[in-house]
Amino acid sequence: MAITTDPFNAFLDYGDVAVPRAGKGPLSGLTFGVKDIYDVAGYPTGCGNPLKLQQSPIRDRSAPAVQRLLDAGAECVGKTQTDELAFSLNGQNRHFPYPVNPRATDRLTGGSSSGSAAAVAGQLCDFALGSDTGGSIRAPASYCGLWGLRPTHGRIPINMTMPLAPTFDTVGWIADDGAIFSRVGAIMLGEDRKDFYFRRLLRAADTFELLPSESEAKTLQTATEPVVATLGAASDINASAAGLDPCYLAFRHLQAHEAWQAHGPWIEKFQPEMMPSVRERFEFGRSVTGEDLARANSVRLVLRSRMDVLLGEDGLMIVPTVPSAAPRHDDEEETLQANRERALCMLSIAGLCGLPQITLPLAKIDNCPFGLSLIGPRGSDRSLVAFATGHPVH
């Protein structure tokens, strides 16, 4: 079955392609979309760029992450939009009609899993596969009022998928219903290495200091109450002892360098038409020096060690998913860039550390969705999903 009506520009018009799946399974009866960076049998892999699409053959096999869902009986109903080469956080790809945020139509969906978020929020499918390198699951899930997970790095196989920055790239998914989100988690995550029992709650004070106003702080404080009721009052702690600006800069240098390594030779050879903001990010990656990388890796190692100690095996850390509701369509480029940088200060923590982070659709600001996140210990993904959704991951 392919989507025949798409008022949200969530899906790409690749025609009616039947993707083989199991007749029965734990996900039977559920439909899903797939971000167009994953190989899916019968489809090209366009990666949000017209030349990539033109050069892509029709795939004869699906990526392992997609195949897990098909083998569990879920039905793939099409491929969803992505920001160009998955290198943006806004959800605006000028090569295609912009996806519409069904929960806040005057605002962006977020990206780069823009179509996946629009498809689920618009009830075009039950869940959707996306990816998260710097926040590409977490930001659109927050902006569109959805559940979203960035898993422990390496937890889910990501081969047969367009790389962006391999030491950050992860497979994730988005759903509108906690029970469905949990059912998908059982298929995607496998078993935790042990049972995790969360007993301590930490509040990353340095991330809350980045909120733009008292309104966001009060909104998230209210949203935190169900978690506090279970685990007790949160202890304030800074996620980074050195401040979040060095974390953002470290992430920016490492991600851009890896992105240039992955795509630079193709860009230099074919000189594709690209959005200026995306091209600028790749050009920045070309300019990253060995000294930049050494400094960034040092920041990453220190933060990773600190977070592992803070969380132990029984702690959860509360962070805002992003600074506020989704940016407006008519925001100036300077406003969008400032929001992106502030968001990445928050989002870079789990990315640099390779830790699982789930965003929960618990809040609203200005009558628009606004997500609250929990970061869990390394490898605690299934326990984290079960705790957050209230649905055991069987």
Image (spheres, rainbow, N blue to C red):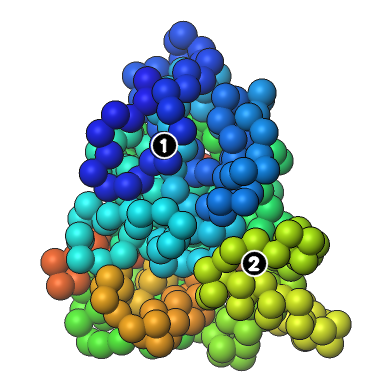
- 98 vs 309, nearest the viewer: 98
Amino acid type for the residue under numbered disc 2? Cys
Question: Which quarter of the figure has residue 324?
Answer: bottom left
Residue 262 appears at what percent x and percent y?
A: 75, 59
- The quarter in which the N terminus is drawn is top left
In the rendered structure, the answer to whether residue 392 lies left or right of residue 330 reads: right
Q: Say which of 285 and 196 sits in front.
A: 285
Figure disc tally? 2
- In the image, taking residue 251 as reference, residue 286 lies left or right, namely right
Q: Residue sitting at 24 percent across and 62 percent down?
A: 369
Q: Residue furthest left?
A: 367
Identify which residue is drawn at 46% across, 37% down. Answer: 79
* Disc sitting over residue 342 in the figure: none
Identified by mark 1, the residue type is Asp
Outermost residue, right direction? 290
Q: Residue 22, relative to residue 125: is it above or below?
A: above
Residue 52 seen: yes
What residue is shown at x 46% (from left), y 33% (from top)? 14
In the picture as drawn, the residue positioned furthest to the top comes out as 23
Residue 72 in view = no
Q: Position of residue 89 (x, y in %)?
A: 46, 67
Tag 1 residue: 13
Q: Which residue is mark 2?
A: 353
* Residue visible at 15% across and 72% down in the picture: 366
Q: Is residue 193 left or right of residue 208?
A: right
x%, y% of residue 100? 28, 55
Residues at marks 1 and 2, CA–CA distance in whole angstroms: 37 Å
